[in-house]
Image (cartoon, rainbow, N blue to C red):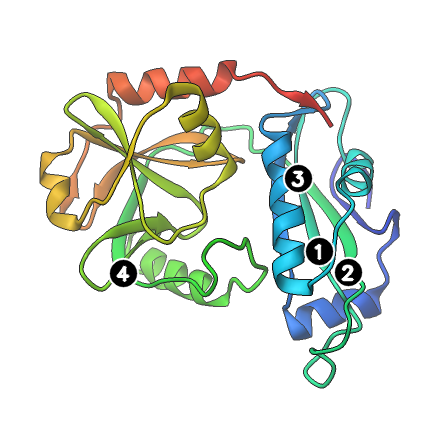
Amino acid sequence: MSREDAFTELDGEPADPGALTALGLTNYGHFTTLSVEDGHVRGLDLHLERLIRDCRLLFDTALDPERARTLARRAAPERGRRIVRVTVFDPALDLATIAADAHPRILVTARPAPDADPGPLRVRTVVHRRDLPEVKSVGLCPTLRLRRRAQRDGYDDVLFTGPEGEILEGGTWNIGLVRGGRVVWPGGDILAGTTRQLLRRAAGDPTDLVDLTGLDDCEAAFATNAATGVRPVTRIDDRTFPASHPAVTRLAELHRKLPASRL
């Protein structure tokens, strides 16, 4: 596959089909997704910290962040934008050997960045909490099953809530709310995405526990992730929100102006 269309390398070499088969069959590992623009990444430090932390949690071993950075750089264009995913897994671990000492490998894949604005999200809530929510796991089947059902019913995605109705996170994104003209980030056991962390670091907006009834006091809602930045949420179940709100517009502009680091 050409660099212009797609990219797949394992430890800097063409990916071994056997290793990819092992990843598909065992589905044990973690990843981070970088939005690379002109060779630069917003929140690169957060992405590398995530890889180090998750590798220690899943594999009980250290990951060299500079090596991961070097391998990811091979997929990044000097000009233009591309979505680069760094996946860490050990093809030697399977159902029978999962307790063995791990020697993780680094899979780098890339795809073109979307050209068009994806538009607002319409979501429905579902009671669900991911296993080890703080880890960006490759085990996406439960999330994608819920997304598939939602899309077949006319929504774009799902918003996870706890058993008491507390708002947690989207399937592959974080949720933010505007209440009293200010941005509020729902708390709880979630994966705090790099975009959410960057925006909170820049703007200092608070976190708070918000349940579904608390949505009645909110003027707007939005989603964040590395690939799409800040995206309006116009529907949560039967509640509707505007596609444009000054607080969300300001946050999106802040995100666009955040400094980026050379990959």
Name which residue lies at 25% across and 53% down.
Answer: 124
Helix or strand or loop: what does disc 3 sit on? helix
Q: Nearer the viewer, mark 4 or mark 1?
A: 1
Q: Amino acid at mark 4?
A: Val
Figure check: 249 above or below 6: above
The answer to whether 29 appears left or right of 20 in the picture is left
Whether residues under marks 2 and 1 lie with C-beta atoms below 8 angstroms apart, the answer is: yes
The image quadrant that residue 43 belongs to is: top right
**How far, Cα to Cα, is label 2 from label 1?**
6 Å
In the picture of the structure, the residue carrying the numbered disc 1 is 88
Instruction: Tell me which label, 4 or 2, sits earlier in the chain.
Output: 2
Figure check: 38 above or below 237: above
**Mark 1 neighbour density, 10 Å: few (under 14) some (14–19) many (20 or more):** many
The front one of 156 and 68 is 68
Figure check: 123 above or below 194: below
The answer to whether 220 appears left or right of 22 in the picture is left
**Mark 4 neighbour density, 10 Å: few (under 14) some (14–19) many (20 or more):** some
Labelled disc at residue 104: 2
Q: Residue 149's spot in the image, x, y percent? A: 35, 64
Q: Amino acid at mark 2?
A: Pro
**How far, Cα to Cα, is label 4 from label 1?**
29 Å
Whether residues under marks 4 and 1 lie with C-beta atoms below 8 angstroms apart, the answer is: no
